[in-house]
């Protein structure tokens, strides 16, 4: 008789996982729970061919967490070497393109390439206007005592 072995672990749909090496690394250990969850979401977007072409919009992020939490978690993943910014979006509603990275393997060593978020994602508007600023006009000008 020929018996067929049944596979107990059939996956339906996409599968996203992390390796044991990633889980035990210094870089992964220091991540917040939101950043770990976000990394899994990035892995879900990876389909085997788009390693450096992952699009994750703010609308996608709003479905799983607040925008503030998304930005903090994304920055943590970039700083620790799990993802990289391939192309910055924002102009004419272009999405930001991310890529999965292996920089995390060297985290905590001298060979680790540090990425500064301020260099990659600089603030668009660095000037903050305050009351009485010339740009605002005279509407907030304090009354002078006569």
Image: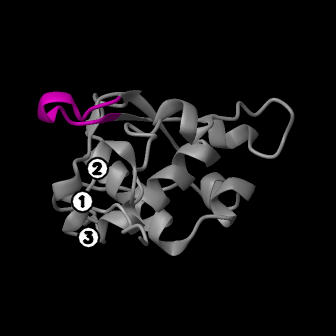
Instruction: Tell me the number on the disc at residue 64.
Output: 3
Instruction: Tell me the number on the disc at residue 136.
Output: 2
Instruction: Classify mark 1: helix, strand or loop.
Output: loop
Q: Are marks 1 and 3 in contact (CB under 8 Å)?
A: no
Left/right of residue 137 with respect to residue 28 in the rendered view: left
Of labels 1 and 3, earlier in sequence is 3
Residue drawn at (31%, 42%) of the image:
135
Residue 31: % across, % down: 60, 64
Residue drawn at (30%, 71%) of the image:
66
Left/right of residue 108 with respect to residue 99 in the rendered view: right
Q: Are marks 1 and 2 in contact (CB under 8 Å)?
A: yes
Look at the image and give the residue range highlighted in magenta: 88-97
Q: Nearer the viewer, residue 75 or 129?
A: 129
How many other residues sit within 10 Å of disc 1, few (<14), some (14-19) or many (≥20)? few
Instruction: Tell me the number on the disc at residue 20.
Output: none
Residue 99: % across, % down: 40, 33
Q: Is residue 128 above or below residue 64?
A: above
- The residue at which mark 1 appears reads as 139
Q: Nearer the viewer, mark 1 or mark 2?
A: 1
Residue 97: % across, % down: 30, 33
* Distance from the alpha carbon under mark 2 to that under mark 3: 38 Å
Q: Quadrant of the N terminus?
A: bottom left
Say whether residue 94 is magenta. Answer: yes
Q: Is residue 17 visible?
A: no
Quadrant in which residue 91 is drawn: top left
């Amino acid at each position: 008789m020929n018996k067929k072995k049944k596979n107990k672990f059939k996956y339906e749909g996409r599968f996203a996982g992390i390796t044991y090496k990633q889980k035990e690394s210094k870089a992964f250990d220091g991540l917040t729970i939101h950043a770990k969850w976000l990394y899994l979401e990035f892995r879900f977007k990876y389909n085997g061919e788009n390693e450096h072409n992952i699009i994750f919009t703010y609308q996608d992020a709003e479905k799983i967490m607040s925008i503030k939490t998304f930005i903090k978690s994304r920055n943590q993943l970039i700083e620790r070497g799990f993802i990289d910014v391939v192309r910055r979006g924002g102009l004419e509603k272009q999405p930001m393109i991310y890529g999965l990275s292996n920089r995390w393997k060297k985290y905590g060593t001298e060979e680790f390439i540090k990425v500064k978020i301020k260099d990659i994602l600089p603030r668009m508007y660095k000037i903050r206007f305050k009351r009485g600023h010339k740009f605002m006009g005279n509407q907030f000008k304090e009354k002078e005592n006569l």
